Each structure stands twice: as C-alpha cells, then as structure tokens.
Amino acid sequence: MHILTKFFVIIAAMLSVLLAGLSIAYTSNADALRQAVVTERMKAQEAAAAASAATAGAGEELAQVRDVLSAVEEEKRGLLAEVNKLTSEKTQLAADVKKLELASQGHDARIEEFTALVKAFLEQDSLRSNENQTLREKEIAYLRKEIELGERINELGSQLEVSQETNRTLQEQLADMRDRLGNLNSSNIASGAAFSAPRAPDGFRATVTGVARDAAGKMLVSIDAGLNDRLQKQMKLSIVRGSSWVGSMTLESVNLNDAVGVIDLSNLDVRAGDTVEASDAGW
C-alpha cells in the first residue's frame, strides 16, 4: 500500500509538471499562467500532503494489520499446539479405551467362568442335598424298621413266653387228664366194664372245615374226613395249629367223607384250616 501511495505521488507530480508546461506553452498571459502554475503547485502540494497523510494512515493501518497478523499467528500457533495436545490426548484415550475393552473382555470371561463355577457348585450342592435328604429318609426308614422289628421281636418273645407257659400248663393239664383217664380205666377194669373209646387210625390227619355252636351252646367242629378214613362215633381227636395245641374233640356224627364233633377241651379258639390229628399223636 505504501508503494501505491508513492506511485500516486509521482503521478501527481508528473501531472503537475505536465500541466505547468502546457500552461506556459499555450497561455500567453503570464499572470494567468503563473496563477495557474501556483494553483497547480498548490494542488500538487495538497495532493502530496494528502498522499503523505494517506501514506501515514496506511502505515499505521499496516502496522495495526501486522500486529493483528502477529496476534493471529501467535493464536494460530497456540491453537495448533492445543490441537496437537488434544490429538495426543485423543490417541492416549483411544489406547486407554482399547485397554479397558480388552480388560472388560477379560473380566467378562472371568465373570462367565465364575458364574459357571457357581452354577456347577449349586448343582453339586443340590445333588448333595438331595442325596443327604435321601440318605436321611433311608436312615429314618431303617431306624423305624429296626424299631418295628425290635418291637415285633419283643412281641414275639412275649408271645413265645406266653405260649411256652401255656404249653407247660396244657402239658400239666394233659398229664393230669391222662392220670385221671388211667385211673378211670383202672376203675372200669376193676369194675368189669367193657367200654373203651375207639382210636383214630395211625397217622390220621384232617382239616377243620367249619366251626359253629348248637342250640345248647356246645362248640361243633366239622372236618373233611369220615367213614372212608375209618372214623367212628365217640372217637377222640386233637386239634392243633402249627406247634400250638388248640383243643380236643369227640366225634358225634360221621359220614362218608366228613364228620362233626364236639369240643371237649380248648386252649385257643378253633378256626377253619386247623389240623386234626389222633388224640394220642403226642399232644
């Protein structure tokens, strides 16, 4: 801009000289020419002053512009430095984010592994709990069974003692009855009586088929043996159940294949299915 101002000043000076020469050459009036020259000189001076003022203003403006440019350049350098710093921080942050992502993946894998371990542990714990519950139930059932067996054994022991005591009593009663029967037979022999009750065949066995009471209250027992088995009226038979003696009976009615007798002596209640033997079969 300073160069343009000088250029304008030079042009103005040249124009002033040119105008002065033209004025001298073509004007005959010296005063007028002088006045014109003076006027042109004044104009030239004014133009030069204006150009100088413009140049001075332009210089100040240029200095201000240069200051502004310097400030802008400084700010630009600061901004570039800030951008570089931010770029570096961004790169570092990206690297940190990548590390965090990798760490997060590792943590996720560990969490999944831990979750699987916890799930497996819970399943094993549930299985152990179920097994323990089953074992406890089995143990309780075994204890109950053992208690029941113990109670049953005690009960059977008590029954055995009672049965043994009853058997001893019956043996004593049977021995007494045999003694009484022997005395009766001796008395009958001594008195000349010829009556004797018939005996059942050796090895005789039958089964009780029914039990009932008659109008007089006597216990009647039906058996599945009769005349075909060589049974007779007034025959004495014993009734047993397993190893227990139930009672004795005397036949009152004998048919071909069945017979009915009356209970003479009983130790237990006679039931259908009891075994009937000869009265001298060891009872």
Image (cartoon, rainbow, N blue to C red):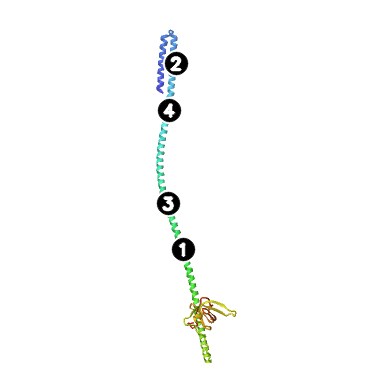
Horizontally, residue 188 falls left or right of residue 110, namely right
Number of the label disc, if any, that sits on residue 43: 2
The kind of residue on which mark 3 rests is Glu
The residue carrying mark 4 is: 65
Question: Which label number is shown at residue 112?
Answer: 3
Please state which of the two labelled residues, at mark 3 or mark 2, is closer to the viewer: 3
Residue extending farthest to the right is 215
**3 or 1: tag closer to the N-terminus:** 3
Residue type at mark 2 is Lys
- Look at discs 3 and 1 and give the one toward the viewer: 1
Query: Where residue 58 appears, x then y in whole percent?
Result: 43, 24
Q: Amino acid at mark 1?
A: Thr
The reply to whether the C-beta atoms of the residues labelled 1 and 4 are less than 8 Å apart is: no
The residue at the far top in this view is 28
Identified at 48% across, 67% down, the residue is 141
Do the residues bearing badges 3 and 2 touch, measured as CB atoms within 8 Å?
no
Report how far apart the C-alphas of labels 2 and 4 lie in the structure: 31 Å
CB contact under 8 Å: marks 2 and 4: no
In percent of the image, x 41 and y 33: which residue is there?
Answer: 76
Mark 4 or mark 3, which has the lower sequence index? 4
Picture coordinates of residue 235, whole percent (x, y): 52, 83
Classed neighbour count for the residue bearing mark 2: other residues with Cα under 10 Å, few (<14), some (14–19), many (≥20): some
Q: CA distance from mark 4 to mark 3?
A: 67 Å
**Secondary structure under badge 1?**
helix
Query: Circle 1 sits on which residue?
Result: 134
Q: Is residue 277 visible?
A: no
Name the front one of labels 1 and 4: 1
